[in-house]
Image: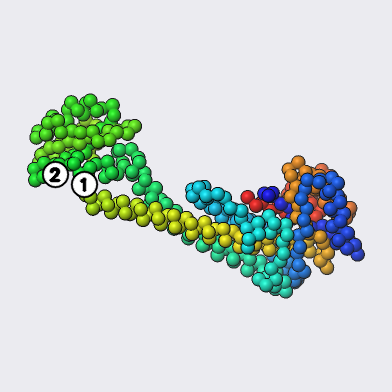
């Protein structure tokens, strides 16, 4: 599947049928750029309206196109992220079961949803409002999923981070803690390089420390977790003296109920995350198809409006979709230009070629035919 397509329209001269121009285009592409896929882009006979309405509409065409393209890319990126996190195999993106590249290259206007007799502005507003609603829904759904994901990540960081900050409840067992009317156990976070200093000094940091009561429970790359048992009445003195020597005292109270509660909360968040991820991914698949369909209908309107403004009335032009490779672009541009009226082509040449349209708006992509790009990714 190509990731970039051109939509182009060529003026049909005089009484020449569009089929004749299409045959010439096919022949030229086949002869000079055979590796460039070429398709008819079937635009229905839309309601033209007034010239003022077309001009007014054309002012916002690029902005609207960029918005729809942006939303489609946003949903695609969300799908890719969800698939990557889930470890699921990537599914082909579709519009009502049709792969997006096939939907574009075999585009058929949906008359039931967008009656061709409706004013063009009404059609564009309808297309845009649908995409706006989907973008708003995406923000809400993604925010809900990311909120649960952030909560779970915070819990995981506490369980796997440095001893200085991590949750200690899964490292401390009931038998490691002494709790009585007079005695208590304190947890100390000791830098790895200071463990000898800890073992030689903890008994003398204050009075009434139980001799040889320190036990190492866990060690990571930076710190070791040690216990020490002492009399309750000297706990504050011990903490102050320990901090002065660079040992961190972590407040901790063992509670099997609290530990079970944290475990249940984590399990619930894991399940919530999985449910939200699955729901969001399914929604994204469906919504991408809706956005892409709206975008392609908009591209049809855009090609129609720009062709009328470029070639005049009555509508007489041939629309097509091409997917040239980078190395073929210059040749394909030349073929398209060669099929335009020679005087019309000269009018649109660049300043270097002496054309009179050079410099209008500084558009480096000005051509004697209507052309714009569709980026699928």
Q: Residues within 10 Å of mark 1 (few under 14, many from 20)?
A: some
The image quarter in which residue 216 lies: top left
Whichever of labels 2 and 1 marks the residue nearer the N terminus, that label is 2
Side of 74 where 30 appears, left or right = right
Q: Are marks 2 and 1 in contact (CB under 8 Å)?
A: yes
Side of 191 where 96 appears, left or right = right
- Report how far apart the C-alphas of labels 2 and 1 lie in the structure: 10 Å
Which residue is identified by label 2? 179
Examine the rendered structure and indicate whether residue 111 appears above or below residue 229.
below
Furthest residue toward right: 15
Q: Residues within 10 Å of mark 2 (few under 14, many from 20)?
A: some
How many marks can you see? 2
Examine the rendered structure and indicate whether residue 131 appears above or below residue 237.
below
Residue at point 68%, 55% (across, down): 101
Expressed as whole percent of the image width and height from the top left, the position of residue 37 reads: 76, 50
Instruction: Answer whether residue 360 is visible to the viewer in this image.
Output: no
Expressed as whole percent of the image width and height from the top left, the position of residue 78 reads: 53, 53
Residue 40 numbered tag: none
Side of 125 where 180 appears, left or right = left
Expressed as whole percent of the image width and height from the top left, the position of residue 88 reads: 52, 50
Expressed as whole percent of the image width and height from the top left, the position of residue 159 reads: 33, 43
Side of 165 where 95 appears, left or right = right
Which residue is identified by label 1? 254
Secondary structure state at the residue bearing disc 2? loop
The front one of 307 and 200 is 200
Examine the rendered structure and indicate whether residue 313 appears above or below residue 187.
below
Secondary structure state at the residue bearing disc 1? loop
């Amino acid at each position: 599947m190509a990731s970039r397509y051109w939509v182009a329209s060529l003026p049909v001269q005089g009484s020449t049928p569009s089929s004749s121009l299409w045959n010439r285009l096919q022949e030229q592409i086949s002869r000079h750029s055979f590796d460039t896929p070429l398709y008819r882009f079937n635009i229905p006979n839309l309601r033209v309206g007034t010239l003022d309405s077309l001009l007014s509409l054309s002012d916002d065409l690029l902005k609207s196109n960029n918005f729809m393209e942006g939303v489609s890319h946003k949903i695609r990126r969300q799908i890719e992220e969800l698939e990557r996190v889930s470890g699921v195999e990537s599914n082909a993106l579709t519009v009502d079961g049709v792969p997006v590249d096939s939907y574009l290259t075999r585009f058929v206007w949906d008359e039931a949803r967008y009656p061709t007799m409706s004013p063009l502005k009404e059609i564009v507003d309808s297309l845009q409002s649908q995409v706006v609603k989907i973008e708003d829904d995406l923000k809400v759904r993604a925010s809900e999923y990311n909120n649960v994901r952030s909560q779970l990540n915070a819990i995981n960081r506490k369980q796997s981070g440095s001893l200085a900050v991590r949750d200690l409840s899964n490292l401390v067992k009931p038998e490691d803690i002494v709790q009585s009317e007079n005695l208590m156990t304190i947890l100390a976070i000791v830098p790895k390089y200071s463990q000898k200093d800890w073992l030689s000094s903890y008994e003398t940091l204050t009075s009434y420390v139980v001799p040889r009561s320190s036990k190492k429970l866990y060690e990571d790359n930076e710190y070791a977790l040690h216990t020490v048992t002492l009399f309750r009445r000297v706990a504050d003195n011990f903490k102050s003296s320990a901090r002065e020597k660079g040992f961190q005292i972590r407040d901790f109270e063992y509670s099997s109920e609290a530990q079970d509660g944290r475990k249940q909360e984590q399990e619930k968040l894991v399940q919530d995350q999985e449910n939200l991820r699955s729901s969001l991914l399914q929604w994204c698949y469906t919504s991408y198809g809706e956005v892409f369909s709206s975008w392609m209908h908009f591209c049809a309107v855009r090609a129609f409006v720009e062709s009328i403004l470029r070639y005049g009335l009555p509508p007489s032009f041939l629309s097509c979709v091409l997917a040239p490779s980078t190395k073929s672009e210059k040749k394909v541009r030349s073929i398209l230009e060669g099929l335009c009226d020679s005087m019309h082509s000269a009018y649109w040449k660049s300043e270097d070629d002496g054309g009179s349209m050079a410099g209008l708006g500084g558009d480096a992509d000005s051509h004697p035919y209507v052309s714009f790009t569709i980026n699928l990714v």
